Amino acid sequence: MTTVLYGECIGSREAAAVRISELADRGCDLETDGLAAVTDGDVALWIGAIGPLPAIAIRKDSCHLVVRFKEPLDGRILAHFRS
């Protein structure tokens, strides 16, 4: 999915507004503004009003993270954001 969605990523001590891309059943890419850094590890992702989705975040650089969901997303969630 190439659509950009908006959400929030909540870590153990921090939260950041994020832009979500490449949403798939197993994970997605996140972009932050770089000021509110979410650390690697367990996070909860909100995609709009859907969440919290438990996941593991891995930082790629100061503004980008890769997220892997702990449980695959239901196909209905993906269909909702594709419509």
Image: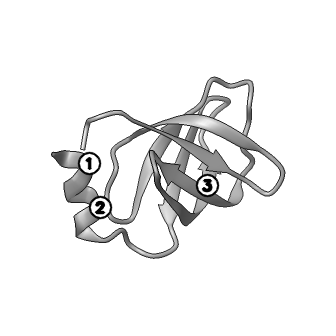
Determine the image quadrant of residue 71: bottom left
Question: Mark 3 or mark 1, which is nearer the start of the sequence?
Answer: 3
Q: Quadrant of the C terminus?
A: top left
Q: Report if the CB atoms under discs 1 and 2 are less than 8 Å apart.
A: yes
Tag of residue 20: none
Q: Which residue is mark 3?
A: 57
Q: Which residue is mark 1?
A: 81
Compared to 31, does 82 lie above or below?
below
Question: Mark 3 or mark 2, which is nearer the start of the sequence?
Answer: 3
Compared to 81, does 26 lie above or below?
below
Task: Decide if residue 50 is on the left or right side of residue 61.
Answer: left
Tell us which disc is closer to us: 2 or 3: 2
Q: Which residue is mark 2?
A: 77
Q: Position of residue 1 (x, y in %)?
A: 24, 44
Question: CA separation, marks 1 and 3?
Answer: 21 Å
Task: Decide if residue 83 is on the left or right side of residue 34.
Answer: left
Residue type (three-letter) at the residue carrying disc 3: Ala
